């Protein structure tokens, strides 16, 4: 099963909509709750990253028999140094975003610790692709 | 312990999400960093924060947080209140600081635990 969500850059009011819709759907499908909880954390962080940093993006959710794969692609500034971006506490978020309690440099580390696989590719000035995989009953 | 009991013991007022007051709370979590809550808070906990915007409800809903206590008489936005009512996640208010209200909530949980053990 495949589902696609559009994510609007800068619109914090809708941040989390894709994640909550996927959570609702996976519960209906009786997917193991521990897997849902892990995936939801990873998805939310990736969604917020697009809202906080990019102009526009999308989430492509693929539900398979043994795993769930979500690919986030965005048009945005891209990430120059992915290893640096992965470090806890590192963030390029604006002051305004930080005041809301985002931008603590914990988003990507949260994705890494909650998902089974995380692949990031990025081109500066074009955008970023974040691929997340959670195995079922892992 | 239910959210209703916590509300009465800690003298909290209710902004919204009344229908969720009968839910059971398992503990608490204190943070103003959203990713910290996302990564570390547990289902059924009461979240104490000074953040008031709508995103706190999205996080509470995704993490199955039992209720949110907003400190220092800060006022949540209309959108936050709407979301809280829709999801039946109580949004509570205190005039106290996070330090004080956390201490009281912790004591309440510890007292409930000790009386349970003595039963």
Image (tube, grey):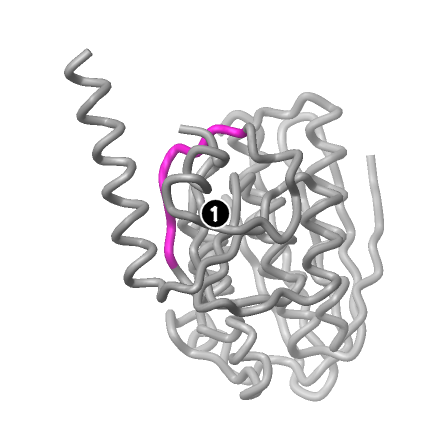
* Front one among A33 and A86: A33
Residue A18 location in percent, x, y?
75, 51
Question: In the image, is residue A28 above or below residue A42?
Answer: above
* For residue A77, side relative to residue B94 (left or right): right
Q: Examine the image and state in which quarter residue A59 appears.
A: bottom right
- Circle 1 — which element? helix
Which residue in the rendered view is the most extreme toward the top?
A: B119
User: Which residues are the magenta region?
Assistant: B23-30
* Front one among A28 and B102: B102
Chain letter of disc 1? A
* Front one among A138 and B47: B47
Which residue in the rendered view is the most extreme toward the left?
A: B118
Badge 1: residue crowd in 10 Å (few <14, some 14–19, many ≥20)? many
Question: In the image, is residue B73 above or below residue A136?
Answer: below
* Front one among A66 and B100: B100
Residue appearing at x 72%, y 52% in the figure: B83
Residue appearing at x 48%, y 80% in the figure: A91
Residue A88 location in percent, x, y?
37, 70
Q: Examine the image and state in which quarter residue A95 appears.
A: bottom right
Q: Which residue is mark 1?
A: A114
Residue B97 location in percent, x, y?
36, 66
Residue B39 location in percent, x, y?
45, 52
Residue B16: say if magenta. Answer: no
Residue appearing at x 15%, y 15% in the figure: B118
Q: Quadrant of the C terminus of chain B?
A: top left
């Amino acid at each position: 099963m495949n589902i696609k969500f559009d994510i609007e850059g800068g619109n914090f009011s809708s941040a989390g909509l894709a994640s909550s819709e996927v959570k609702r759907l996976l519960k209906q499908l009786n997917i193991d709750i521990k897997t849902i909880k892990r995936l939801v954390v990873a998805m939310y962080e990736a969604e917020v990253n697009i809202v906080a940093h990019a102009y526009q993006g999308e989430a492509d959710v693929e539900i398979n028999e043994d795993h769930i794969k979500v690919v986030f692609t965005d048009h945005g500034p891209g990430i120059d140094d992915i290893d640096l971006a992965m470090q806890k506490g590192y963030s390029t978020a604006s002051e305004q975003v930080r005041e809301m309690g985002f931008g603590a440099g914990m988003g990507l580390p949260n994705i890494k610790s909650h998902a089974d696989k995380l692949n990031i590719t990025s081109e500066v000035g074009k955008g970023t692709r974040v691929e997340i995989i959670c195995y079922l009953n892992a | 312990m239910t959210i209703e009991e916590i509300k009465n013991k800690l003298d909290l007022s209710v902004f919204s999400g009344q229908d969720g007051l009968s839910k059971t709370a398992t503990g608490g979590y204190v943070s103003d960093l959203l990713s910290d809550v996302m990564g570390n808070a547990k289902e059924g906990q009461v979240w104490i924060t000074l953040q008031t915007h709508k995103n706190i409800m999205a996080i509470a809903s995704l993490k199955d947080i039992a209720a949110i206590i907003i400190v220092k008489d800060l006022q949540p936005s209309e959108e936050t209140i709407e979301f809280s009512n829709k999801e039946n996640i109580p949004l509570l208010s205190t005039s106290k600081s996070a330090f004080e209200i956390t201490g009281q909530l912790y004591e309440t949980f510890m007292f409930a635990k000790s009386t349970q053990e003595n039963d």
